[in-house]
Image (cartoon, rainbow, N blue to C red):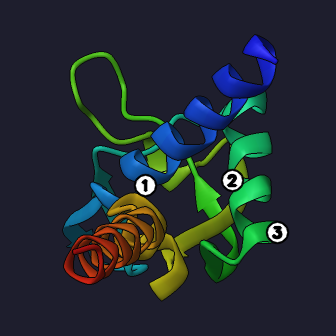
Amino acid sequence: MLLHARREWAVRAVLRRLARQRVALVLQPGNVWVIENAVPDNEETDAALKTCFMRGWVEPLENSVPKGRLGPNGELPQAFRFQTSGPVWRVTEGGWAAIHRSNEWALVGILLGAIGVLVALVP
């Protein structure tokens, strides 16, 4: 049960981190997006993003986008040679609701409303 809770926390952490990404600049020629606060490209993150995709929290904005890392001094790869390719993800309405825990807040509101009705009915 503890392992399940840790995985769930990791999935939500990746979702929140994805929501903090932003395009810092677009390099020309080639329309290359430089993304700040990018989600790490590893197996754990890939599994979490696919879990989010299954739940409808994210969807691919573009597929097969070239990906790479900046050099140690922040320089671009020579001749824009990228190591891998993969999707660029976007957070859906369901993902924003999961980030803000809208469902849980709605349940708390209904519970408090029901308690208030019960207190009003009891003489």
Label 2 element class:
helix
Vertical order, 114 against 16 (above or below): below
Of pointers 2 and 1, the one earlier in the residue sequence: 1
Which of the numbered marks, if any, corresponds to residue 4? none
- Which of the image's four quarters has the C terminus? bottom left
Q: Alpha-carbon neighbours of circle 3 within 10 Å: few (<14), some, or many (≥20)?
A: few
The numbered dot on residue 54 is: 3
Horizontal and vertical percent position of residue 77: 44, 40
**Distance CA(mark 2)–CA(mark 1):** 9 Å
Left or right placement of residue 77 versus residue 44 in this view? left
Residue 101 versus residue 23: which sits nearer the camera? 101
Q: Mark 1 points at which residue?
A: 18
**Residue 22 placed where, x, y %?**
25, 63
Q: Residue 57, position in %: x, y?
A: 60, 72
Q: Could you say which quadrant of the image residue 9 lies in?
A: top right
Q: Quadrant of the N terminus?
A: top right
Q: Do the residues labelled 2 and 1 touch (CB within 8 Å)?
A: yes
Earlier residue among tags 2 and 3: 2
Q: Which residue is drawn at 65% across and 79% down?
A: 59
Question: Is residue 78 shown above or below 97?
Answer: above
Amino acid type, residue under disc 3 in the picture: Met
Residue 96 % position (x, y): 40, 73
- Residue 32 appears anywhere in the view: no
Which residue is drawn at the image coordinates 53% and 80% (left, top)? 94
Q: Distance between the residues labelled 2 and 3?
A: 9 Å
The amino acid beneath tag 2 is: Leu
Circle 2 sits on which residue?
49
Q: Image point 52% across, 34% down: which residue?
A: 40
Gap between marks 1 and 3 measured at Cα:
16 Å
Of 97 and 41, nearer the camera is: 97
| Quadrant of residue 8 within the rendered picture | top right
